[in-house]
Amino acid sequence: MSRVHVIGCGLAGLSAAVRLAAAGLKPLLYEQSGHAGGRCRSYRDPALECLLDNGNHLLLSANREVLAYLDLLDARRGLRENLPARFPFVDLADTRRWALNLESGRLKGALGICKALPGVRPRDLSALLRFLFVREGAVVTDLVSSNHALYRPLIEPLTLAVMNGPPEAVSASLLARVLRQTLFKGAAACRPLLPAEGLGPALVEPALAFLAQRNIQPLYHHRLKDIGLSAGGVDHLEFAAGRSDLKPGEAVVLAIPPWGCDALQERFLPQVETKAIVNLHYRLPKSVDHKTLEPFLGVLGGRIQWIFRRGDVVSVTISDGERWMADAPETLAQMLWPEVAAALQLGEIDTPPFRVIKERRATPLQSPAAAGRRRASRTAFSNLFIAGDWCDTGYPATIESAVLSGRLAAAAILSR
Ligand SMILES: Cc1cc2nc3c(=O)[nH]c(=O)nc-3n(C[C@H](O)[C@H](O)[C@H](O)COP(=O)(O)OP(=O)(O)OC[C@H]3O[C@@H](n4cnc5c(N)ncnc54)[C@H](O)[C@@H]3O)c2cc1C
């Protein structure tokens, strides 16, 4: 079979490339930046002197596409798989602590939710059944309103974490798909999978190694500016560095986000609004016994939402983070550290060394209207395929969606 050009080396592009390579093809990969991973990457931070992720990423045992991708790469060891399906929370407003523990069986787990979540009675749980029958166009608050007992302790934090947007703005059907595959299936589907060393070693480097073994190296600093079309489909690619002509039979996987190439907007990529995520990484002082801290903690009643710990670095996530984009990193780190210290019960400690990473375009806004504009992997052109977390996979814009979209694009090419 002829060559395939994969544009974009995020997880969607890597997923497509490794599937094509596993089938014996030698795809050509192009990436605008100097590294692979896109919105899911690690780098060595000079200030904190350790490997940092651009942001906390939580995977669950229900993420079958990600696990299949890692199995193909023989790389499951990059994830910590031994964590129980237990989600600890603290409410900074009243310092109450609880854990959503799903390990106690499905029915017991459901009753456990009532016992664990503050103010929730058994009959409140029936609201979750609404996620089984979701009308197209509904937002999350159409199903569970903001004054419902489940809203504050469960629906709001879950929606922010999964959808990176507020419950009143995001698609209920995308969230419902995740709930049906996770919470509703119990502990076996909800065990957290955290990168052992980082997102790069866990999800990106194994793919690059798999490709390198087959003599496939991405071409970095290759930014796609436009694609040339003729009656037969794509006939050339225009990069900032020059033009690449396609031979008959060659195909293209466009694995870039909707905002990745202005010239392709509307023709192949939809116009989208984007949502930000702010991450703050703090290196704990030696006086803190970090091994006693939870690997992650949900936080209500403050401005921070989740705290993850890897070694002596704690990393804070603020989804739907537009309002913090203009603040200086020092201001944010100083302002939010007291919340971190309170949530982790560290007592009075000066703000430790930190790094702030603002992802202005972390995900598309996943409104019902935007969900309706998602694209399938096949296009009207027989040799042009699309991949990316924002594609019509049925999942929110997550790693699972990105990896699935890449596999679907590769499968469509291989079935030609
Ligand atoms: C802070 C943060 C936290 C997140 N948390 C989670 C989480 O907990 N769980 C989860 O599942 N998901 C999470 N996500 C979402 C997840 O990271 C993304 O869904 C996924 O990485 C998207 O992969 P992708 O390949 O579709 O897109 P991208 O990662 O954006 O990859 C696209 C690639 O294409 C390149 N590119 C763009 N334009 C061009 C061009 N014109 N020419 C050449 N190359 C181009 C880019 O440089 C990039 O490398 C989070 C995202 C962020 C930012």
Image: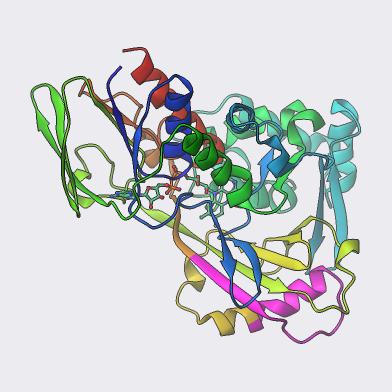
Query: Which residue occupies 57% across, 59% down?
Result: 319
Q: Residue furthest top?
A: 415
Q: Classify 265 as above or below 319.
A: above
Q: Residue furthest left?
A: 231
Q: Position of residue 277 (x, y in %)?
A: 53, 61
Q: Quadrant of residue 67?
A: top right
**As drawn, is 47 to the left or to the right of 191?**
left
Q: How many marks?
A: 0
Q: Position of residue 370 (x, y in %)?
A: 38, 41
Q: Quadrant of residue 232?
A: top left
Q: Position of residue 358 (x, y in %)?
A: 50, 67
For the N terminus, the quadrant is top left
Tell me which colouring the rendered structure shows. Answer: rainbow
Out of 39 and 332, give the one closest to the viewer. Answer: 39
Q: Is residue 130 visible?
A: no
Query: Which residue occupies 36% across, 34% down?
Result: 374
Residue 131 belongs to the span the image colors magenta: no
Residue 356 belongs to the span the image colors magenta: yes
Query: Which residue occupies 75% across, 36% down?
Result: 190
The range drawn in magenta is 334-358
Q: Classify 161 as above or below 324.
A: above
**As drawn, is 264 to the left or to the right of 125?**
left
For the C terminus, the quadrant is top left
Q: Position of residue 379 (x, y in %)?
A: 26, 25
Out of 118 and 62, give the one closest to the viewer. Answer: 62
Query: Which residue occupies 43% across, 49% down?
Result: 365
Out of 381 and 117, give the one closest to the viewer. Answer: 381
Q: Is residue 300 visible?
A: yes
Q: Classify 53 as above or below 131.
A: below
